[in-house]
Image (cartoon, rainbow, N blue to C red):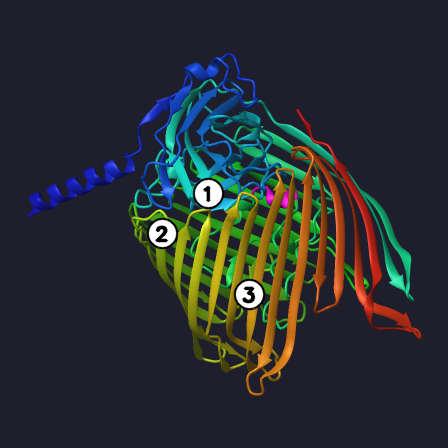
Amino acid sequence: MRKKIGILFSLVLIIFTFYLNANSVIIKLKKTDVPPRIDGVLDDSVWKSAFKADDFKTFKPDFGKTPHKRTVFYMAYDSHNIYFAIKAYDDPQEIKTSLKKRDNIFDDDWVGILLDTFNNNQKAYVFFLNPSGIQGDGTIGSDGKMNETQDFVWYGAGKIDDKGYTLEFKIPLKSLRFPKGKKIIMKVGVFRNITRFSENMSFPPFYPNKGSLISQAAQVELEGLKYKRVFEVLPAVVHNSSSEIEGGILKPKEKNTDFGITTKFGITSDITMDATYNPDFSQVEADAGQIDINLRYELFYPEKRPFFQEGSEFFEFAGNTENAPLMSVVHTRRIISPIYGIKLNGKLGRKDTFLGLFAKDNIESGEETLNPYFSIFRYIHSFKDDSYVGGFVTSKDESGYFNRVIGSDGRIRLGSSSVAEYHYFGSFTESNGEDKTSYGHALGLRYRYTTRKFILDTGFQDLSDDFRIDTGFVFRKGLSRLGFFALYQIYPNSNFFKKIEPFYWSYHIYDKEYKTFETFNLFVLRFTLPSNTQIRLEGSLGNEVFKGKKFDESGVGIRINSQITKRIFFFLSLRRNGKIFYDPESPYQGYGNSASLYLQFQPLDQLESVFTFVYSDFYRKATDEKIYDYSILRNKTTFQFNKYFFFRGILEYNNYWKKLNMDILASFTYIPGTVFYVGYGSIFRKIEWKDDEYIASDRFLETKRGFFFKISYLYRY
């Protein structure tokens, strides 16, 4: 019996070892002494002897198929840079491309490079170029999700010819973090998107049942890399002046010129410190309008300030299913107007990652000025494939008050197709006048199983009513929640139907305060067609508990998106369902319609106009009385003179508040950090000043006006 157990154990060990080393082939790259010229032409001698691959396979709409068009990939390096080149064969008349601002290329054809510099499957840099040579970049986490917020200094060029298009990339090592050593192994993957075929392909081939995305990238060996200590200084000046209406007349309200400075210092090749004074004091583009009435929870706005965007991927955490109530442990927009901040992040060896952030805020609250301190620490220890265990410590402290959260999260790779995740956070809050500290918790468990044909994703969250996280974003507490998602993928033998996906998504909540259950069940049939086209039909059965009462939220809907031509893309969503009027004293049942339209028109490669329309209405069910209808119409038109300079205008009309916003902006960005912006904005309302008061009017009156400019320059040593 012991012998049989021993043999069985040995077989399991052999299989497990084979799984861990399935992608252990290492490609040894040849170092070059003559760097290529980055011009989108493959006439440099380095490409003749560089590593070359053309074994691309699709992963969208199906896996492992031969792509419609051939792609050839080249890679080389020297002591200070890594170089990539792509020859993408295609019909030049069919290529979808545009000249537009950075990070706005993902509705074009494009090629992306994935680079895991530490070979630990936890995080990878990603660099994109469209056929016109416009850049996009960001990072990919261990869960395969992309974070587009971070911008890196690197160089690229693209050129279209009669055989397709050619791209060249130059990635400076001082823009990356990488381990020390004479020989370094990194992971590299290449992706190409062809919009008209709704097709993505990769080298090496990617399969959903063979582990995480990063773990399937190719391993390459580089030797003799030289780390040049990074030191950056980014001074910036912003000036703004504004006027507001008073007694029916616009009068100067505020004029201010401000200065800020941010520095970056590379302590080692894998540890960096950032420090800033008066950071991120202007936001170039205002948040797009959202429907802001009849809300149960506050609106969520994404972070746009560069100092806080960098490294934000480390704040993602495991154990959450879709729409889970704890959206983020760290939401840096909670730091409203920081006076200064310091950030330290990097690696302690290949497996340990950390990030520490400290900032002092400055908040005007009536006649009082508050200066809370924010302290955040994140740690991750990685294991094989994308498994890791991590921890958070966050704190907000001010006079007579503190809120602290401590906890752990992690991901465990159970097999090539399955992953388990968890998080547990405890909060500790104390205010003046309270006799004791308030304690709360947030628990999350998740299991995900993925194959070519089937996806199962289920999870459980439990949040106590006393849980509080001042550094994060949580929209509901005092509940237990079970989420479930199951999707089946059908690949018809058809040139029209690329994929058919029926799926079911649901969540089931126990409200602890009212000891009541609620449920939401969504049934969807989704079709993927050519030209980046999807059609989604959906129906739902559900209810929601509010103030101890249960309300119906069942409904039906449809979504359609398509790249109709190279110049026109649209997205349309229509839905009719039960709704709640969130009156804390007397809520009632209603129903209504919701609609959203996104229409992108690109008459020229340099010119793009985007129209968006958002609509929602509400009817009281008992009487069919219309309580409100709310719509926002927005147009953003951009003319891109070249890859550095654009001019943009925005018009947004809010029908509910009878408000018209107008913004114009001229922007020049040479590299991330070296920028110049000048902008002007006005707000108009349908009012008039009459008999010493404002009354409704059919005509617009300008109520606010503002002008600003910002200039910053990145000194990089």
Q: Which residue is mark 1?
A: 196
Q: Secondary structure at mark 3?
A: loop
Q: Which residue is mark 2?
A: 499
> Can residue 477 be seen by looking at this rendering?
no
> Can residue 244 be seen by looking at this rendering?
yes
Q: Which mark is residue 475?
A: 3
Residue at x 55%, y 47% (from the top left corner): 377
Crowding near pointer 2: few (<14 within 10 Å), some, many (20+)? Answer: many
Magenta part of the protein: which range? 306-311
Of the residues shown, which amino acid type is indicated by label 1? Arg
Quadrant of the snapshot with the C terminus: top right
Q: Magenta segment: does it hold 154?
A: no
Magenta span: predominant SS is helix
Of the residues shown, which amino acid type is indicated by label 3? Phe
Alpha carbon separation for disc pair 3 and 1: 39 Å
Q: Secondary structure at mark 1?
A: helix
Residue 401: x, y in percent? 66, 62
Of the residues shown, which amino acid type is indicated by label 2? Lys
Pair 3/2: label in front: 2
